[in-house]
Structures are given as structure tokens and as C-alpha cells.
Amino acid sequence: MAESNFYLGRLVDAKTAKPTANPVLYDPSDLTTHAVVTGMTGSGKTGLCVALLEEAALQGVPAIIIDPKGDLTNLLLHFPELLPQDFQPWIDPEMIRRAGKSQEEAAADAANAWRDGLKEWGIGRERLLALQNAAQFAIYTPGSDAGIPVSVLSSLAAPDLDWESNAEVLRERISSTVTALLGLVGINDIDPIRSREHILLSNIFETHWSEGKDLDLTELILQTQSPSFSNLGAFPVDTFFPQKDRMELAIALNNILAAPAFGTWREGESLNIQNLLFTSDGKPRHSIFYLAHLSDGERMFFVTLLLSAVETWMRTQSGSTSLRAMLYMDEIYGYLPPTAVPPSKGPLLRMLKQARAFGLGLLLATQNPVDMDYKALSNTGTWFIGKLQTERDKNRLLDGLESAAGGIPRAAMDKLISSLGKRFFVMHNVHEKMPVLIQTRWAMNFLAGPMTRAQIPELNKLVKANSTRQTAPVPAAVSKKGFKPQPSMEALQPIAVQDTSTPVAMPPAVTSSPVMNRSSSSNGGSLTKPSIPAGIREYFLPQNFSLPEAFQSANRAMASQAMIQGVMYRPSLLAAAQVRFLDRKYGVDAETTRAAVVNSLDSRGIVRWDEFTYSGPSLDKVETMPAAAARFSTIDAPLNNAKLMTALQKDFTDWVFRNSEVTARANAKLKVFAGPDITAAEFMKQCAETAREGCDMEVDKKTAVIEKKIQALESKLGREKSELREDEAELQNRNIESYANLAELGASLFGLARKKSVTTQFSKHRLAQSAKAQVQESQENIVRWSTELEDLERQRDALATEINNHWGSIVSEVSEVSIKPKKTDIYVNLFGVAWMPYYIVQAGSETIELPAFGAE
């Protein structure tokens, strides 16, 4: 057989209905015109499709496989050695019970059957080993972690296609995606032209995708509430789709996000088709999407997203005439109906028409030939028709083939179909001259039947299936066009920052806003600020930290190539009040600010304000607008509940009233009072000065009489001392005169001088004695009055000391008085949602959040 062709089985002689020795070799390039396999349950349809996929794997053709029932999980059951113990875990216990055999016996029978069957069809161990090593097989389970989980939210991201060049195609993808999403919330059978919901969501998608911005479900919900555009057509958004109605739609979408079961839809692998088709080293992959556990609505939603992702990938490929990849759907019932227009139909129709040019082949299977759009399948080049359940099914199929393909030999086809048995198919290939009857070969994989979700982990373990991720994820906070900060905000520029060896002494960050290390997948946030109910105010804290300061505040060493990727705002409750203390008795007129920021709120609205005192940037620097291109995390109760916020503001006011006071100092005797703006030292200085003045006044008053006596005595004493000096001079003169006169008298007695009278001498002596008496009197007066003066001075000083001691004791008689505010003197000037900025920083392979704000 030609190695480049698919070996599907043997030709069957239509006359004898017996297989011939001629192999059926199918040119894989014929699959670029697609193929349909139809047949009832038990016709061998699954075996044929498995064989087609096996051959594709052997030829290095990758495949995306949509498996609604669980049959295609058998593609992982490669047992080249054909050992019974390999088969045993995968045999249905119920079948063993009905057969009345042991597990070992059933496993041996299965191994023998596969050994004999493969031998009959000329398939040896080498080909089995080649299949096992030809491709990487894996089972994905959207909405479950049984297999490799799939993140459907990543499918809302902007495709890697230029909008201007592919606007029509991308609008078609948007329409399909929105229709599937609305179907998930129970809005079905909608007309994209008439449905307000479809028009609104489609415009949100187009606004983001046309600018290269990703969407996720959170962003879509927020945009539904507050669209970034003002008009839809000629009407304002609120006229076309009132806010109340938009809120109902947002709540319906939020129910998906809020449902615990939806958690697994948010995690896992993205629908990156290139990674699903090839490993990082170029090895082909067969990626099986197991959907048996999903509801009909969930299946439609996921299948639509997957088909749209495949279509987008297809359009990024160059043209090809050979088979580049396969897309297989094991059951297309409901996805391509003749009249209805489910969201899956659009991408299927477009790929059926256009995928050939890109080398993508669609293989579609169904057991219900009645409910198929044969007109849509007119581009299908190959039909594999197995045994059908009723004549009605056969006639509908023939009618459909006649209208779709045209020119088929209906009578011959009817005869061939009627003669079909198990594993016998009519193969109608437009590239061949006429339809042929074939018997399909034995499948190389063990066909154990549909697998349950519980068996998926072991299946993946069997083939060592792993993640398709090949590179570190891009932080969710950055759009495809890159982060675009405000030109005026240097701190947000995505530039590499060199480490510094000198530590920076930093004040503490706001205690209620701890440093966060989050993976990018968990903190992507939204470019749309969450809607806040009317009446709730919003504030934006400034980004007052540089990147080194942000690392320092987080007690982290800064990587040499740390780079700011964006800014994430996270909500907290900010409360601040101006409090005035007024007490005229104590002379108090002061103001203070009480502030708190709460980032861990009880949903019931219970806050212990003492634990959340504010120590961030100055409140006069709080901004009213966010940074450009910043993202926002979600906002929860009570921050989005106006009633709870009103109650919280009252509670904050009560807390401020109960816990606010200032201390006034008072000296009642001195009548000196001071408020909190006067320090203790300044207050004592005022008291000392006042006491000094009072003391001086009392001293002056109570010593006034003594002072007068002292002044009088000092005056008399002064005069007496003056008289004493005069009397002493007079005495000296009188003594001199007396001595001189006595000398002259003696000389006259001896005849040495003129004769002097004795009377004169006595007169001189008497005058001298009188002068002496006056001197003695003055001296006695001075001594007596000096003693009296000293007594008065001692009395005065003792009285002054007593008064000084009294006033000195009064100075220390200080009391402290607590002054409480009146409720009317409390003014809440800030209360509402405070958006706290965090830098999203790429530090090597780690994406972290660091606070962009803190105490100055």
C-alpha cells in the first residue's frame, strides 16, 4: 500500500457482498474537501472514524477532536504488545458480568480478538508502535478537572488577526460567540439584528477587539453595566437599552461567573489551536475534547468557542492543497440543522466553504441523517454511508445527497445502502468515478466503548498527557497592544529598573493594604471600572512610590530587570472626618482629622475602626480620576451596597464621636487654660508668668507700709548721717580752735605773745564740748535707726518669701480636662470607595503586585 495514503479497509464486491483482496487507500488530500460519516448505532461508524484518525496520526496530521459521547477517548488505548493485562482495566465490568467470565478471561479474550483482527488486516507490531509514537494524545475536559481543564474565558480574548483586514470574519466570530454566550444564560433563538442583548454584547466585543484589547467574562459583565461607548446606532445607550434592563443581563451573565460549578471553566489551558495541534518541538497532537459531562447549553457554548478558535487559527495559515490538520466532530446533530441557526452553524458553514484553501479538513459524523443541512454539506467531497435505521433515514439521505451533490446514481446508491452490514460502508468520493462499497479495517486502538469522566485521569496518565503550555503566561493586566501609561506618570512606564545596593529608608505602607503576590491569571482585573451605586463616592489614592520604594516597602529585594507592566486598582473603604473641639470655658478651639482605610470588609458591614487607622499619603492628595490604562479588580459588598455604606458612615461618625477627645490643661487659681495645641512646657511657662505677675502685685501691696517705714527711716538715716558729718567737722574745728587758743594763752603767760583772756579759752572749750555732744547724739541715732531699718527689711523679706512660696505652690496646681466634640462638630469630608493602586511587576518569571502608595 502507498504509505502516503490512508489505509481504511478493503473493497467489497457489490454483487456478492463479500470483501475482496483490494485495499481501500484514501488520498488524505481528498479530506481537504471534507467528509461526512453517517450510520446508525452499531454500524461501525466509530471504528471507521477511529481508523481515519489513526491514519492521520501515522501521516503526521494533527487533529482537534470533539467527542460528545466519550467514544473517541479510545484513541488513547494503544497496546502494541497486545497483552491481556493492558486490556483488563478498560473492559466494561457490566459486559464481563453478562458474559459470565472473570476479568482475566475477558481481558485474554479481548487481547486475542485484537491480535487476530489486526493479523487478518495485515497490521503488525511495527505499525502499532508507529501509531503510539506518531502523535501526542491528550483528553481535555472543559468545565471539569478530570482531564486537562480548559479556560473558556481565554476564548474571549482578542484574536491574533488584524481587525482592518479581517473585520468581516471577526464580526462573524463575535456574532457566534455572543449567541453561544446568551444561550448559556437561557436566551435562545435570537435574531442578531433584533436582539438588544446581542447588539449590546457584540458592540462591546467589537470595541475591545478592534483596539486589540482582550475581554474576559468579568470585563464583559462590567461593560454591560457601563459600556465604554455612549451610543448604539442613533440612540444613546440608555435609550436603546435602559440601565435597569442592562443590569438584569449583567446579573444573568454574573450567575455564570458566580456559580461554583463554573470555577473550572475559568482555569486551565487556553484555546490556543496552534498549541493544541503541535507540541513545542513540532510533533503533531491529537487533542480530544470530552463533552459527555456537559449540558446541552454548555456543549453548544463550548463547541461554538472551539469552532471559532479553529476558524481564526485557519485564517492565520498560508494556503495549502495538502491536508494540514483535521477537525473531527463525532456527532453533528443539533450543530448543523437544516433550518435553525444555532451559534455553531456559522463557523461550520464558513469552514466547510473556505477551509480547503488552508489545508484544514472537516470530518463530521452523525447517526441522524434526517436533521442535517444538506445544502451546507454540498461542499463535502466524501461521504461514508453505513447501515441506516429506517427507510425514512435512507430516503432523506438520498434526497439530501441528490440536492447537495447532484448527479448521484440514486438507484445504485439505494441498492448499495440497503445491502450494508456492520462495518460496511458506501464511500462516495467526488474525486473518484463512482461510489464503492468498502469494509473498514480493524482499529489499531482498543475500542472499549464510551469512557466515563472518572476514567479520564487514568487515560491521560496512560499516554503521559500533559499541558499544552509552552511559554510563561502573559500578565492578564496587559492588553495585546501593550500597556500605555499616562505620559505624566513616569512610575508607570514599562522600563527596566536597575537594582540599588543602598537600601532606602522607607516609611511604612498603609497597614490595611498588605503587599500581594498574585499570579497573573488570578488578578487580571478589568479595564472597566466596576459600576458604583449612586450616592457612593469614589477616590483614587496617588501613586507616590517609585518602583524601588515599592520593593522596599514590601521587604523584597528588587530584581535587576524588574519591569512595571501596569497598574491594578483594588477597592477599600476610605473614611475621614474633621473634628472640631470647642470649649470657651477652657479656651479650647481646635481641629483634628480622624481617618481609616479598610481593605478587609465584612460583607455584613461590620468594621472595627480602631484596627484600620489611615497612614497613607496625605488626604489632600487623594485624586478623583484613575491612572490611564489601569485595571480594576471586582468590588463586593458592602462597597457596592448604598444602604450598607450609609449605615457604615453613621457607624464611622459614631466611632469618631466616641473615640475623639482632646486634653485641655487648667490652673483654676491662676485662671490659665490651654488646649491641645499648647505643649506642657509652654503651659507651665504661661502659669509661671501669670504667677509671677500675681506674686509681684501681692508683694507690692502687702509690703507697702513697711516700704514706707523703710523709706522714712532711710531718709532720716540719710539726714542724720549728713548732720553727723557736719557735726564731726564742727567738732574738729572747735577742737582746733580750743587747742590754738590754749597755746596762745600759755604763750601770753610766759610773755611770748600778746596777752589772752582766760574767759575766751573757756568759751572755746564749751563750744567744742557742745559739738562733741552733737556728734555723739547723731551717732546714737544712726545706730538706733539702722537697727530699726534692718528689722523692717527682715519683715519685708519674710513677707515677700511667704508670698512667693504661696504663688509657687499655685503654679503646680495643674489639672487635665478631656474635651469631647459635639456630634454637630463632626464633619465627614471623605467616605466611599478608595481605589488603592498596585504596580503589576514582572520580576523575572514571576508576576507580582506591589503597593504603589504609602506613608510619605
Image (tube, rainbow, N blue to C red):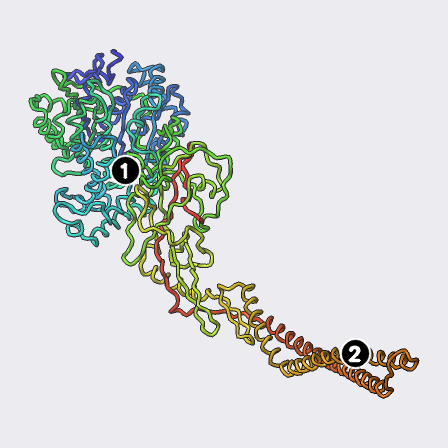
Between 659 and 801, the one nearer to me in the picture:
801
The circle on residue 733 is 2
| Picture residue at 38% right of the left edge, 29% below the top | 466
At mark 2, the secondary structure is helix
Horizontally, residue 73 falls left or right of residue 26, namely right
- Which amino acid lies under the numbered mark 2 shown in the image of this protein? Asn
Between 493 and 708, the one nearer to me in the picture:
708
Between 618 and 709, the one nearer to me in the picture:
709
| Picture residue at 62% right of the left edge, 81% below the top | 704
- The image position of residue 3, as x and y in percent, is 27, 12
- Disc 1 target residue: 214
Foreground tag (1 vs 2) = 2
Horizontally, residue 84 falls left or right of residue 362, namely right
Which image quadrant is residue 216 in?
top left
Residue 549, relative to residue 728: is it above or below? Answer: above
Which image quadrant is residue 477 in?
top left
